[in-house]
Image (tube, rainbow, N blue to C red):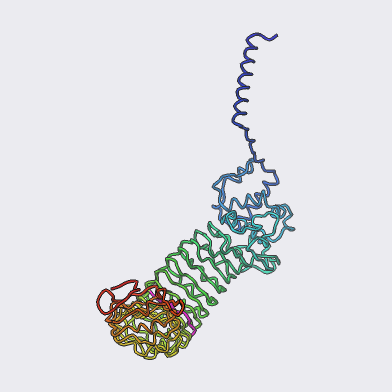
């Protein structure tokens, strides 16, 4: 028999153990198993070193975790949560990518071209750098058993691939004998896919890429400085993101580029003069950034341009003297900048221009007949909130395609041209807030039967309101306030304008009743016709004083 003291100790231990058992049963506490990552095998160590050597051909040394190689060799994987995307890519390829491990386990003479291996590393790196787990569509991305050409948004084609990765930096001068045909990335198109993070610099080593499209995501960071390496790029579309920094001067090396869309980001600095090297470019979009400085005169060398969007920036100075060289330009938007000076004479050469928005700048001088007459294709011209002076060119009335003419908030001193509606194509005329536009409307606008908006407010116009305005079937907005119009309001005629919804006549010298304007909807009740609804959404007159009776005005002055 054991000693009595031993029995007491065992009893005491039994009670303690039972107590713990009871507590675990009450709170349902189950000890969690500990997950232990097994140490890498010798083969994995060798794979890791080989893959790192390949990565270093395109990635800067400082982007790797310098301690990882040591840790791995001493039988512990790198698990630092702050790893770079480059480091994550190397480890993924080492431990999770079947295709890549198969490649590195083969003798070098049986491996695919090293440029193909580099390509897989770059796209894997991109997946980590731009957070594939948040994408709307990440089909096949970071799938270690599927070729990158089958990853969502990737398109490949047959190109010459460099056999030895040591030559990747000399790709433009590589001897064809040192290449072999392989499937290489031609397009990356991941628009509207919830991408974030930064565009990795390594992406610029995909030298066969012709299209890079990341439109409408939340990408941050800057445009890669070595962008000039993508010499085969034809389309770069990174609009509507949060990209910062400046536009690299190396952009001028992309001499095959046709479409360059950087709009709606947070870019700053100047538009580099090297932009003039892009002689194949037909579309340039830089709108909605923080760009400043002058518009480089070299831009006039891009004679294939059909679209130029530089609005909502802080560009200063005048338009380039030779901007008329862009004689294929059809859509030019430069509104909301700080441009000044007058239009250069060469502007008359822009015969293909259909849309021209130059509003909210400080451009001055006169819109001369010689310039306006050259805009034979013009449909939409908006130049409000500038400092234009002089007269309104008669040539506007001869532009057969002109739909919109907006010259509000300028310093124009003229009457409405007699022939302004000669072509009959105008839908919108806005000459408001010039202070020096005077004279009568008379019959000058009678041929504008497609009119939807007529705004002559805040000028010095006189005479009566023509009754023919009521025959304009599409007229929606008529703003004649703050002038010196007199006579009787042609209420009966205006009531016949079926589309009219906004009528502002206040601060004039008008008289008369507005009853027929106020009554619109007709409902038959037996032999009676009852008017039940107000016609207008906005109707203002000088109805606070004598002379005008208005029962439906939304504002009286």
Locate residue 184, reporting x and y percent: 66, 65
Quadrant of the image occupied by residue 433: bottom left
Residue 308 colored magenta? Answer: no
Relative horizontal placement of residue 178, taking residue 285 as reference (left or right)? right
Locate residue 498, reporting x and y percent: 44, 80
The answer to whether 221 is drawn above or below residue 537 in the figure is above
447 and 374: which is toward the camera: 447
457 and 81: which is toward the camera: 457
Relative horizontal placement of residue 104, taking residue 289 as reference (left or right)? right
In this figure, what is the number of numbered marks? 0
Residue at the outermost front position:
526
The image quadrant where one finds the N terminus is top right
Locate residue 535, reporting x and y percent: 41, 76
Residue at the outermost left position:
546
The answer to whether 64 is drawn above or below residue 492 in the figure is above
Relative horizontal placement of residue 128, taking residue 178 as reference (left or right)? left
The image quadrant where one finds the C terminus is bottom left
Residue positioned 59% across, 44% down in the render = 79
Residue 387 visible in the snapshot: no
Locate residue 452, reporting x and y percent: 43, 80
User: Which range is magenta?
Assistant: 351-359
Residue 302 visible in the snapshot: yes
The secondary structure that most of the magenta stretch takes on is loop
């Amino acid at each position: 028999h054991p000693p009595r003291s031993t029995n007491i100790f065992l009893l005491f231990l039994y009670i303690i153990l039972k107590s713990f058992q009871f507590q675990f049963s009450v709170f349902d506490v189950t000890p969690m198993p500990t997950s232990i990552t097994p140490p890498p095998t010798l083969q994995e160590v060798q794979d890791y070193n080989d893959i790192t050597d390949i990565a270093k051909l395109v990635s800067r040394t400082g982007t790797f975790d310098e301690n990882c190689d040591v840790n791995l060799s001493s039988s512990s994987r790198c698990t630092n949560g702050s790893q770079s995307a480059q480091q994550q890519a190397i480890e993924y390829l080492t431990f999770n990518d079947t295709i890549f491990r198969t490649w590195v386990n083969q003798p070098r003479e049986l491996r695919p071209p090293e440029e193909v291996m580099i390509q897989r590393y770059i796209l894997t790196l991109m997946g980590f750098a731009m957070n594939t787990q948040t994408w709307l569509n990440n089909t096949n991305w970071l799938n270690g058993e599927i070729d990158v050409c089958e990853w969502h948004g990737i398109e490949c084609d047959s190109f010459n691939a460099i056999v030895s990765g040591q030559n990747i930096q000399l790709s433009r001068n590589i001897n064809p004998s040192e290449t072999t045909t392989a499937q290489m990335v031609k397009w990356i198109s991941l628009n509207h896919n919830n991408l974030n993070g930064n565009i990795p610099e390594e992406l610029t080593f995909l030298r066969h890429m012709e299209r890079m499209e990341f439109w409408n995501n939340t990408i941050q960071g800057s445009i890669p400085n070595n962008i000039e390496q993508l010499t085969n790029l034809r389309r770069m579309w990174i609009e509507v993101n949060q990209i910062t920094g400046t536009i690299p001067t190396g952009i001028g090396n992309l001499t095959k580029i046709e479409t360059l869309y950087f709009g709606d980001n947070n870019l700053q600095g100047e538009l580099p003069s090297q932009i003039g090297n892009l002689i194949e470019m037909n579309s340039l979009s830089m709108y909605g950034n923080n760009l400043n400085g002058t518009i480089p005169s070299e831009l006039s060398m891009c004679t294939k341009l059909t679209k130029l969007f530089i609005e909502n920036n802080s560009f200063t100075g005048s338009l380039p003297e030779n901007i008329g060289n862009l004689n294929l330009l059809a859509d030019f938007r430069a509104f909301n900048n700080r441009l000044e000076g007058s239009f250069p004479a060469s502007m008359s050469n822009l015969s293909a221009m259909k849309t021209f928005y130059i509003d909210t700048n400080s451009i001055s001088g006169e819109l001369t007949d010689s310039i306006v007459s050259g805009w034979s294709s013009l449909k939409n011209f908006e130049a409000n909130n500038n400092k234009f002076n002089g007269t309104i060119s008669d040539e506007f009335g001869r532009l057969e395609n002109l739909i919109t003419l907006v010259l509000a908030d300028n310093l124009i001193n003229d009457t409405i041209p007699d022939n302004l509606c000669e072509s009959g194509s105008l839908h919108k005329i806005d000459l408001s807030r010039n202070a020096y536009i005077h004279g009568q409307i008379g019959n000058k606008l009678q041929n504008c039967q497609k009119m939807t908006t007529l705004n002559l407010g805040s000028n010095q116009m006189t005479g009566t309101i023509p009754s023919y305005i009521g025959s304009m079937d599409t007229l929606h907005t008529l703003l004649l306030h703050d002038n010196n119009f007199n006579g009787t309001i042609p209420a009966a005629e205006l009531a016949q304008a079926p589309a009219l919804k906004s009528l502002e006549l206040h601060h004039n010298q008008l008289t008369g009743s507005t009853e027929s304007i106020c009554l619109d909807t007709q409902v038959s009740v037996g032999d009676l016709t009852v008017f039940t609804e107000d016609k207008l959404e906005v109707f203002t007159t000088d109805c606070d004083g004598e002379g005008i009776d208005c029962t439906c005005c939304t504002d009286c002055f």
